[in-house]
Image (cartoon, helix red, strand yellow):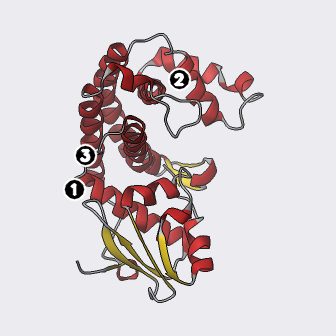
Amino acid sequence: MSATSLDSGVLKRPTRAEAWSLAEAQNDALVAELRALNPEDWNAPTDCERWRVKDIVAHLLGWAEFFTSASEFRLQLRALVPGKRELPTATDVQNELQVNDRRDLSPQELLAGLEKALPRFLTFRTRATRMAGIVPFYAGILGPATVGLLMATVFTRDVFMHRIDIARATGRELAVGESERRLVADVVRDWGRRSKADARLLLTGDAGGDYVLGSGSRARISGDPLEFCRIMSGRAEPEVMTVSGDREAAASWLGKKVVF
């Protein structure tokens, strides 16, 4: 495997067309994996605090319906002001509302709703990006961002990371292919830009790759690509990676999170 230098400009953000292809692939993979779950899997605890597998699906359905249903849009917006008194951010408030409002839905009802809402949400995302992609906004870890980044990148990463959460919770192996490999590569690109790392990053397995950040000389970091994404999302500690060279610098670089 030849190394990819991030400074060479070879590794670019996915094009708009590629972004929608990745989003569709992740949606399809999520639905396929949910269809394969056993009844008891839906109640398995996940890495998301207080959430079971069923709650993750309710959350994903809640976001899809927020953008595709006028009544759901109004409902979630109305909850933001009083909810902020109890939770730190508006996003936290919405996440909890999405889960709580769907608490009584069965796994079959959640899955049916998701199968219906995800294609509509993807259509909305493409239109919103086309019409308002450069509109700026500020949202926590994102910092200064745009509607296009949220719609084309963040929501796709959210589905990908929750697929990882569900696979870990249920003890199932995550299906990995070209879509996941491309998503991991984009996370690496984003992380390199944010961290200014000077390291060789070797991610093993089907979703992995060999990357050079900066000169690549100060440290060598290696490990599983899905664990790397879990570090970037705050779900795992940098210690799960193997580091040689400047360990202190590597720990600092790995502490720079990427939005999921």
Point out which mark residue 98 bears: 2
Tally of marks: 3
- Which residue is identified by label 3? 175
Point out which mark residue 178 bears: 1
Q: CA distance from mark 3 to mark 1?
A: 10 Å
- Which of 220 and 11 lies nearest the eye of the viewer? 220
Question: Which picture quadrant has residue 143?
Answer: bottom right
Q: Secondary structure at mark 1?
A: helix
Q: CA distance from mark 2 to mark 3?
A: 27 Å
Does residue 10 appear to the left or right of 77 in the view shown? left
Judged from this view, the residue extending furthest toward the top is: 104
Three-letter residue code for mark 1: Glu
Residue drawn at (25%, 26%), measured in percent from left and top?
Answer: 35
Question: Which picture quadrant has residue 81?
Answer: top right
Above/below status of 112 relative to 143? above
Residue drawn at (30%, 76%), measured in percent from left and top?
Answer: 10
Residue 213 x %, y %? 44, 79
Three-letter residue code for mark 2: Gln
- Which of 114 and 122 lies nearest the eye of the viewer? 114
Q: CA distance from mark 2 to mark 1?
A: 31 Å
Does residue 68 appear to the left or right of 31 in the view shown? right
Residue drawn at (43%, 41%), measured in percent from left and top?
Answer: 165
Three-letter residue code for mark 3: Ala
Residue 62 x %, y %? 47, 25
Report if residue 242 is visible in the image. Answer: yes
Does residue 115 appear to the left or right of 189 in the view shown? left
